[in-house]
Image (spheres, helix red, strand yellow):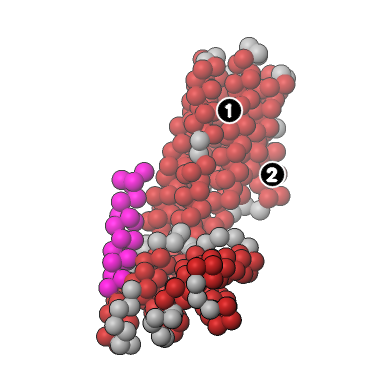
Amino acid sequence: MRLRLFSVILLVATQCGLAAAISWGVAHHVLDRPSPIFAPSAAVGTIVAALGQRARRTAELMVGVGVGLAVSDLLVRVIGFGLWQIGLVVALAITVALLASGHSGALVAQAGGTAVLIATFAQAERGLQWARIVDAAVGGIIALVVVAILLPINPMRILERAAAPVVATLCTQLREVAYALAEHDRGRATRALDQLSAMDPDLGRMHEALGGAEEVTVIAPARWQRRHDVEHYQVGIPHIDRVSLEARELARWAVTTLEYDEPVPKELPAAVEKIAEAVHLLRREARAGQPFDQTYAAVLDSARLAGRAYRKGRKPFSDAMVIQLRTMASDLLRATGSEPETANRIVREASMV
């Protein structure tokens, strides 16, 4: 996975180095800050945030600094400096930040860090509050300039690379389920189920990549022309999520079918094989920007075979797999942009042939 994402990793690392250098230079040479250590820190913190959350991360940095300054400065003026005062100031700053945001993150971390600085160093170093605000603003803004203008990511590249392991696992393991059903190999079906159940990290990375692609097509002028392409992924990815869950259920019913030694109509593994082919074709045609003609054909073939298996089998566990196949077929059609009612009707009509 790291090798597949190497170019993205290299780009993010370069963005961090460039943003840190520029933010230091701006704060030191332009704003005459002697040691602006928080400017590059804020820049790096913004860039290494999850893809799609960098603008939010900058806002959280600023708000967190403001919360930490407000709470700590007010309390220090009232209760003074000391051991117990530091603990109280930090605890109250964290409490206010958590109540304001509802979750931990950059806002809370900045509020706590700022409170520590004010409670411990403000007496010895005047103007620390203003310096902290300036550094956070410079770092966050420079980070956004770097990721939006100087070195924006290629949204389609990160989407395609994040989607690749999801599609590969679905295709491979659905074919394993098909083979297991054809050969009555329960162990193979169980292994396929285990692999499908371990897809959550890949699905999470795919959603993170989608968030990053959406963000960069909004804030990076050089990537505005890719908005339409990203919109295809916005439509398709939620349905791929559903297909991955349905594939797990399909594999689970396959294991149960083989465990109870139910007869398996030959059309059933063929239908599973076709749905795996449809997943592969969906990604290939989406990458090429082609109409989804081959995906449609494979989906309809799967629905027809599933319908024949249902009419021939009439066994409870096999019937459950047919239901999953029809649901997967509908979701794959919806991933291509079909309306729900249209997708359901097409699958239903195909399954009756």
Q: Which residue is mark 2?
A: 344
Residue at the (51%, 17%) spot, across then down:
187
Q: Which residue is mark 1?
A: 251
Image spot of residue 242 (x, y percent): 60, 43
Instruction: Answer with left or right where residue 155 lies relative to residue 261.
Output: left
* Magenta part, dominant SS: helix
Q: Tell me the tag on residue 211.
A: none
Whether residue 269 is visible: yes
Magenta residues (range)? 1-21
Mark 1 or 2: the one toward you: 1
Q: Amino acid at mark 1?
A: Ala
Instruction: Answer with left or right where residue 216 lies relative to residue 260.
Output: left
Mark 1 or mark 2, earlier in chain:
1
Q: Is residue 7 magenta?
A: yes
218 is higher (above) or lower (below) than 311? below
Residue at the (57%, 68%) spot, across then down:
88
